Amino acid sequence: MSIRLQRANFLVSDMAAALRFYVDVLGMEVAFKKEDRGTGYSHVVFGIEPGVKVDFVGLSTPTQPRVMALTQVPGLVSQPQPRRSAIVLDVEDVDGIVKRAEAGGFHMFEEEKLVTHDGRVGREIGILDDDGNLAVIYHITGWV
């Protein structure tokens, strides 16, 4: 039996603001868009009221097509803590992402030294999008 992760999906309140984070800061690319769906499977599984129009955007990285999705739900409020999910991204340009996140006014957590289960070390930083969705970026720099 095999399992392949197709994509992660975050709910967002404003697609333009979300794309400012996922495209402009993290460097993802818009792969496709589906707009103005008033009913669908997303309504059922996310518990969105029938008739609420939602937009859907698939995102790619340079090496992974359609690995992330955003579903816009008008009137969505930020989820309370503790946060229930995150995406974790291995990135080459940590400093560039941090600089763009700072310039965009996104909330960033203090950088931590990363030590992996197999003894690699690196840097990791958590960043919140405008809706409180968590992205943790990291980069391995060597061995313990």
Image (cartoon, helix red, strand yellow):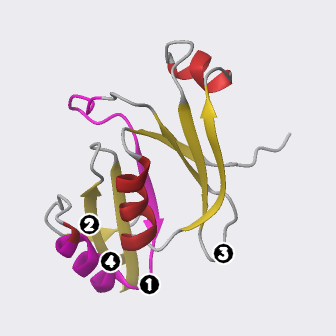
Which of labels 2 and 4 is toward the front?
4
Callout 2: SS: strand
Residue beneath the point at 27% across and 77% down: 100
Task: Choose the circle earlier in sequence order: 1 or 2.
Answer: 1
- Find disc 1 in the rendering and name its residue: 92
The numbered disc on residue 97 is: 4
Q: Is residue 144 visible?
A: no
Percent of width and height locating residue 138? 37, 71
- Find disc 2 in the rendering and name its residue: 125
Q: Are marks 2 and 4 in contact (CB under 8 Å)?
A: no
Task: Choose the circle earlier in sequence order: 3 or 4.
Answer: 3
Estimate how packed mark 4 is, as few (under 14), some (14 to 19) or many (20 or more) residues with alpha carbons within 10 Å: many
Kindly give the residue lying farthest to the left in the view shown: 110
Is 96 above or below relative to 50? below
User: What is the distance, in whole Å, between disc 2 and disc 3 at their CAs?
Assistant: 21 Å
Kindly give the residue lying farthest to the top in the view shown: 50
Is 5 above or below relative to 82? below
Q: Are marks 3 and 4 in contact (CB under 8 Å)?
A: no
Which of labels 1 and 4 is toward the front?
4
Callout 3: SS: loop
What's the magenta region? Answer: 77-103
- The verdict on residue 91 being magenta is yes
Estimate how packed mark 3 is, as few (under 14), some (14 to 19) or many (20 or more) residues with alpha carbons within 10 Å: few
Kindly give the residue lying farthest to the front in the view shown: 36
Q: Amino acid at mark 4?
A: Ile
Apparent side of residue 140 relative to residue 111 in the rendered image (left or right): right
Callout 1: SS: loop
User: What is the distance, in whole Å, between disc 3 and disc 4 at their CAs?
Assistant: 17 Å
